[in-house]
């Protein structure tokens, strides 16, 4: 029997302040510590789960003031701003583009940070930067967007198409940046056995736009291979799934490749692409997935399917939602399956995490629901009159006092 | 009063109707050595002083406290932390206890299993082969650990 100099309550006090990687290692200290630290899953409140779910340093990483919920309602793209703490809907702004009314899946949020929101108009491959604090409110019940600025499009370079777009903030140069990877098939003539033939090769380039300079600059792709991926959101067999996420100056994409799916990360400070493999998520025929963030860790929400998915993937019940968390980027072994939720038949799709592991879910009635995996209690957030295609982002606003609250 | 154990002592005294000549009463603290006690008293006084100086500004208080704590940690050896924690625990001085636990967590975060066992006075109680299995399964968590 091993007894420490310190009483168990104090040992718990100390351990509760350690990051998950350290805790996993310290499980090898003794049997007592193995039991004390626990295993990573959502079933119990143990020290390891706590370190994964609860932010350790709230002073340095405060909660954002707002939660941005974008929805498509009555053929309009509406951005709802909720209080992040109480989830009360404070106000909403309609996003309008010049000369065009984008369809529900056309206009997507790429990322939001430090008060700026990056939107992507997929059919036209246009990137927009939007500062909602410059929106003016009109006399009607909702205010319309202004302060939208469109970045130099790809089209001056013919035949290029955008593979991926990312947006974020570089704290070192104190600048907002947009990263874009573009591709084209270049056709050229070659002689084969005396005959002129068409040949083509795929050309791929990466470029970064700096808001401070207002221009694009080409950067090195490095050895990273971009397989097949979708810019931000894809519409597949009646569902909308999101394959990108952003956190702390790094943008992430889920990319599908023949050798196996990978997550590509782009750090806006050193402007380098890195990859990490995905875990073995199972043997099902296909998966519906969402890439998101849980308390500074990259997380994936995975629903396996063994048959062709119908319009609502939860129509055929039961379904299982697996939650995986990546504890160290670049280390495939550090993926941890936290929990499997048997989804109620009322659910449609998971949207992302709130605080302490609680999940936002879109239900079959097009409503936003909050689910607590520990208590299994659902709370309907009463965002009414909103059709499908929710997109959820955390929104940090620099000047919250400028907003006028519109009921 | 921050030293809740001491406060309890005064409360008990009052209840027994003994006039507490506060400045001359001797309070027995058998479980606390003089050295950690001195550090805790200094910590407590400093904490109260900073709080008084920045009455309205909580952020300022936190910032100054952090600076003082950084300075304090430079003078304290890691081994002394155990004593300080036990003293703060005995005196029921929550702020100091949390601070020193934070300091220990920081000190051991990147350390090896052997270091931690020595620090806490623990021995492995695993069955034969159990520990090896765990180490192998979670090998990635052993990367980048400080040399002992």
Image: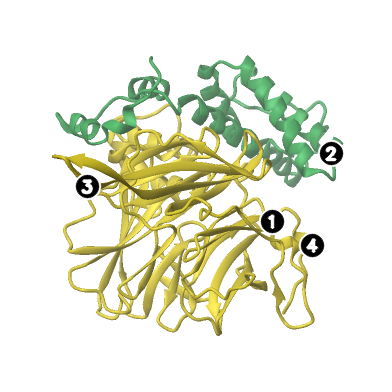
Chain colours: A yellow, B green
How far apart marks 4 and 2 lie (CA) works out to 29 Å
- The front one of A1 and B111 is B111
Kindly identify which chain the residue marked by label 1 belongs to. Answer: A
Q: Residue at label 2?
A: B54
Residue sitting at x 31%, y 49%: A227
User: Mark 1 sits on what residue?
Assistant: A397
> Is residue A278 rendered to the left or right of residue A122?
left
Locate residue A205, reporting x and y percent. Answer: 43, 42
Instruction: Please tell me whether mark 4 or mark 3 is closer to you in this view.
Output: 3
Residue under label 4: A402
User: In the structure shown, which secondary structural element does the residue marked by tag 3 occupy?
Assistant: strand
**Looking at the image, is A117 positioned above or below residue A9?**
below
Q: Residues within 10 Å of mark 1 (few under 14, many from 20)?
A: many
Which class describes the residues within 10 Å of circle 2: few (<14), some (14-19), or many (20+)? some
Quarter of the picture holding the C terminus of chain A: bottom right
Who comes first in sequence, dot 3 or dot 1?
3
Q: Nearer the viewer, residue A122 or B121?
A: A122
Asked if residue A393 lies left or right of residue A82, the reply is left
Viewer-nearest residue: A279 or B40: A279
**What whole-number distance in Å separates the C-alpha atoms at marks 1 and 4?**
10 Å
Q: Nearer the viewer, mark 4 or mark 2?
A: 4
Q: Which residue is mark 3?
A: A197
């Amino acid at each position: 029997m091993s007894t420490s100099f310190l009483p168990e309550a104090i040992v718990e006090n100390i351990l509760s302040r350690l990051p998950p990687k350290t805790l996993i290692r310290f499980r090898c200290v003794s049997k007592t510590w193995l039991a004390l630290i626990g295993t990573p899953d959502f079933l119990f409140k143990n020290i390891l789960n706590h370190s994964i779910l609860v932010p350790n340093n709230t002073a340095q990483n405060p909660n954002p003031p707002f939660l941005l919920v974008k929805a498509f309602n009555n053929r309009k793209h509406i951005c709802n701003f909720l209080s992040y703490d109480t989830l009360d809907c404070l106000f909403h702004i309609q996003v309008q583009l010049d000369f065009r009314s984008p369809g529900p899946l056309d206009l997507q949020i790429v990322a939001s940070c430090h008060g700026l929101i990056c939107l992507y108009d997929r059919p036209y491959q246009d990137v927009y930067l939007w500062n909602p604090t410059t929106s003016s409110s009109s006399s009607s019940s909702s205010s319309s967007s202004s302060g939208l600025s469109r970045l130099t499009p790809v089209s001056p370079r013919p035949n290029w198409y955008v593979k991926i777009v990312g947006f974020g903030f570089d704290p070192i140069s104190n600048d907002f940046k947009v990263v874009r990877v573009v591709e084209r098939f270049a056709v050229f003539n070659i002689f084969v056995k005396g005959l002129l033939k068409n040949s083509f090769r795929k050309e791929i380039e990466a470029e970064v736009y700096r808001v401070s300079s207002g221009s694009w600059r080409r950067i090195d792709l490095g050895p990273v291979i971009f397989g097949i991926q979708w810019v931000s959101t894809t519409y597949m067999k009646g569902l909308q799934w999101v394959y990108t996420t952003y956190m702390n100056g790094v943008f992430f994409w889920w990319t599908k490749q023949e050798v196996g799916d990978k997550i590509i990360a782009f750090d806006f400070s050193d402007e380098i692409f890195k990859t990490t493999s995905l875990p073995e998520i199972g043997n099902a025929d296909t998966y519906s997935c969402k890439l998101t963030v849980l308390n500074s860790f990259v997380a994936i929400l995975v629903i396996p399917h063994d048959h062709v998915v119908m319009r609502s993937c939860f129509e055929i019940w039961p379904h299982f939602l697996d939650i995986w968390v990546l504890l160290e980027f670049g280390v495939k072994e550090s993926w941890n399956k936290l929990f499997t939720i048997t989804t109620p038949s009322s659910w449609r799709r998971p949207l992302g995490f709130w605080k302490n592991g609680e999940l936002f879910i879109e239900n079959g009635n097009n409503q936003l629901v909050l689910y607590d995996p520990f208590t299994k209690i659902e709370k309907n957030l009463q965002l009414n009159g909103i059709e499908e295609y929710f997109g959820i982002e955390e929104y940090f606003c620099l000047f919250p006092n400028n907003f006028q609250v519109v009921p | 009063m921050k030293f809740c154990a001491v406060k309890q002592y005064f409360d008990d005294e009052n209840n027994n109707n003994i006039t507490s000549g506060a400045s001359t009463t001797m309070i027995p603290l058998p479980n606390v050595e003089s050295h950690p006690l001195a550090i805790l008293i200094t910590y407590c006084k400093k904490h109260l002083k900073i709080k008084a100086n920045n009455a309205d500004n909580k952020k300022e208080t936190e910032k100054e406290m952090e600076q003082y704590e950084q300075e304090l940690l430079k003078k304290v050896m890691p081994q002394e932390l155990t004593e300080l924690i036990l003293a703060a625990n005995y005196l029921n001085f929550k702020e100091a206890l949390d601070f020193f636990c934070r300091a220990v967590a920081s000190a051991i975060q990147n350390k090896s299993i052997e270091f931690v066992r020595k620090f806490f006075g623990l021995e492995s109680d695993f069955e034969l082969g159990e520990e090896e299995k765990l180490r192998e399964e979670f090998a990635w968590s052993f990367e980048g650990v400080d040399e002992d």
